[in-house]
Image (spheres, helix red, strand yellow):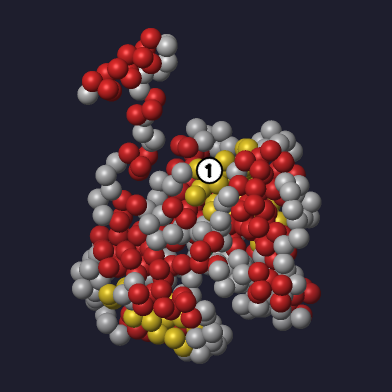
């Protein structure tokens, strides 16, 4: 106590702010979280210094890797489970099913455990082994099925739907693509962005997988200020770019060549789709950019080298989109995007030098210039 008093007195005599070193940040970090649910959402907005300096815009990103399950999908899993619990579709002891090889499974497994529910995840058996190992470690029951088209009854999404239907009254098919709880979870993401920027932003940029993020955030931000530009960044093999730019789901050349998205079309995971989901249909998108795998890989390496930011493939693609948006808007604008997850879940492909070299994608750029963004 005496030491603290002396320090305070010394600071006071030097005319310094008395309590700055004891100040605590705002938001969730100040509160004691009531269980893991309190560690979902309310993520910080990080200014990406290198991109901001190079573009002359403020490039800000929601640090979603800081959610308890390590990705933006925690928000969606929590909202889907909370809504289903509130209206009686899900009870303790009940079963949650989902068809996914992505982060949603991880988020659902954690949220389900906390809600005393069981979790069953169906995924294609060509998905990386470490994904099913992680889900099993989290207590989920993993069903691996042959990879077939979504129209086939054996597709992993259809398997998950059937497994829930087999336990009527006590099972929830989460259905992140069509379940609008996804959209509602991201209305909150939009509200957080609005609050954190005090409404001073000109554009929001994001890729879309289910479309929940871009739909929820765009709807909230435009409800507050319709001048905010919403821009989509779309990976190879996805046709949302054509939908936004030309009003058609496939470009003619894509449809003729039957180039529908498959896992080999792009290195990015979690973004890109060839149908309009219920969630994406609520998105208010003004413009779209195409992003290449090369740009995403270069950006992943760039952010690590220049900013110490280790992010996943969709987050890197979002940052590519933010740079393209900065070029369209010109210097002096504030652009917000999303860091969907961290790099740790991408060690076998996106952050694996051998894999990148084999696919001709080894990053080449050094230094802070952004000439790799076309
Ligand atoms: N990044 C990752 C890692 C994801 O798992 C997803 C969801 N599939 C997305 C981005 C895309 O977000 P959304 O589904 O909200 O469009």
Residue marked by disc 1: 46
Q: Quadrant of the C terminus?
A: bottom right
Against 135, residue 288 (above or below) is above
**Residue at left 35%, top 83%?**
163
Q: How many marks?
A: 1
Q: Which residue occupies the foreground of this view, 308 or 95? A: 308
Q: Which residue occupies the foreground of this view, 234 or 269? A: 269
Q: Is residue 184 visible?
A: no
Q: Is residue 337 left or right of residue 88?
A: right
Q: Which residue occupies the foreground of this view, 125 or 195? A: 125
Res. 283 image quadrant: bottom right
**Residue at left 41%, top 74%?**
134
**Residue 168, percent across and down?**
26, 80
**Residue 148, percent across and down?**
55, 87
Q: Is residue 279 left or right of residue 162?
A: right
Q: Is residue 316 visible?
A: yes
Res. 262 image quadrant: bottom right
**Residue 100, percent across and down?**
46, 75
Against 342, residue 173 (above or below) is below
Q: Quadrant of the N terminus?
A: top left
Q: Is residue 123 left or right of residue 244?
A: left
SS for dot 1: strand
Judge: label 1 CB < 8 Å from ligand 1.
no
**Residue at left 40%, top 68%?**
106
Against 89, residue 64 (above or below) is above
**Residue at left 42%, top 11%?**
15
Res. 332 image quadrant: top right
């Amino acid at each position: 106590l005496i030491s603290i008093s002396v320090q305070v007195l010394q600071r006071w005599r030097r005319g310094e702010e008395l309590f700055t070193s004891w100040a605590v940040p705002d938001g969730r970090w100040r509160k004691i979280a009531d269980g893991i649910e309190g560690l979902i959402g309310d993520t910080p907005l990080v200014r990406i210094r290198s991109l901001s300096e190079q573009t002359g815009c403020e490039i800000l990103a929601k640090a979603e890797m800081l959610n308890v399950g390590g990705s933006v999908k925690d928000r969606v899993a929590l909202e889907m489970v909370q809504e289903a619990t509130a209206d009686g579709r899900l009870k303790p002891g009940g079963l949650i099913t989902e068809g996914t090889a992505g982060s949603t499974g991880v988020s659902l497994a954690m949220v389900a455990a906390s809600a005393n529910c069981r979790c069953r995840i169906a995924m294609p058996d060509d998905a990386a082994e470490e994904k099913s190992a992680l889900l099993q470690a989290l207590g989920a029951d993993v069903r691996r099925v042959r990879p077939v088209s979504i129209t086939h009854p054996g597709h992993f999404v259809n398997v998950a739907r059937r497994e829930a239907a087999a336990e009527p009254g006590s099972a929830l098919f989460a259905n992140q693509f069509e379940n609008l709880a996804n959209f509602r979870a991201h209305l909150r993401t939009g509200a957080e962005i609005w609050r954190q920027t005090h409404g001073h932003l000109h554009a929001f940029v994001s890729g879309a997988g289910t479309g929940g993020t871009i739909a929820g955030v765009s709807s909230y931000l435009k409800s507050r200020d319709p001048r905010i530009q919403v821009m989509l960044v779309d990976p190879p093999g996805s046709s949302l770019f054509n939908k936004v730019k030309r009003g058609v789901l496939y470009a003619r050349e894509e449809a003729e060549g039957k180039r529908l998205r498959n896992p080999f079309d792009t290195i990015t995971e979690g973004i890109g789709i060839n149908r309009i989901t219920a969630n994406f249909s609520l998105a208010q998108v003004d413009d779209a950019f195409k992003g290449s795998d090369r740009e995403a890989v270069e950006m992943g390496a760039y952010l690590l080298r220049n900013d110490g930011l280790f992010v996943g493939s969709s987050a890197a693609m979002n940052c590519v989109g933010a740079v393209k948006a900065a070029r369209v808007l010109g210097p002096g604008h504030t652009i917000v995007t999303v860091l969907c997850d961290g790099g740790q879940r991408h060690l076998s492909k996106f952050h694996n030098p051998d894999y990148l070299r084999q696919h001709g994608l080894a990053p080449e750029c050094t230094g802070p210039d952004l000439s790799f963004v076309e």
